[in-house]
Amino acid sequence: MSRHRSLKSSSFASGGRNVLTRDERLQLLGKDGRWKEGQNVVGLPKTKVPGKVKKKG
């Protein structure tokens, strides 16, 4: 029995992630100045995931 092409494991590696880990969110918020060392890590503000920029034309 063959496997459907959308279930290949290589497709997951090539695609980007749309969720950041808590550590990645803290680093991103620290760069923006929205979080400082020692603050509570529960209830962090939302962050935009840096993504690819589409070319026009």
Image: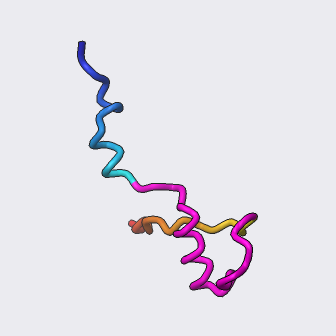
Residue 34, how many percent across, how many down?
A: 69, 82
Residue at 44 percent across and 68 percent down: it is: 53
Residue furthest left in the image: 2
Tell me which colouring the rendered structure shows: rainbow
Residue furthest top in the image: 1
Task: Say left or right for 18 vs 57.
Answer: right
Residue furthest front in the image: 38
- Residue 46 among magenta residues: no
- Residue 41 among magenta residues: yes
Residue 6, how many percent across, how many down?
A: 35, 32
Residue range (magenta): 16-42
Quarter of the picture containing the C terminus is bottom left
Observer-nearest of 32 and 52: 32
Above or below, comparing residue 16 to residue 39 in the picture: above
Residue 38, how many percent across, how many down?
A: 69, 82
Residue at 50 percent across and 69 percent down: it is: 50
Residue 4 sits in which quadrant?
A: top left
Observer-nearest of 42 and 25: 42
Residue at 30 percent across and 38 percent down: it is: 9
- Total marks shown come to 0
Quarter of the picture containing the N terminus is top left
Task: Say left or right for 31 vs 11.
Answer: right
Above or below, comparing residue 55 to residue 31 in the picture: above
Residue 23 sits in which quadrant?
A: bottom right
Above or below, comparing residue 52 to residue 26 in the picture: above
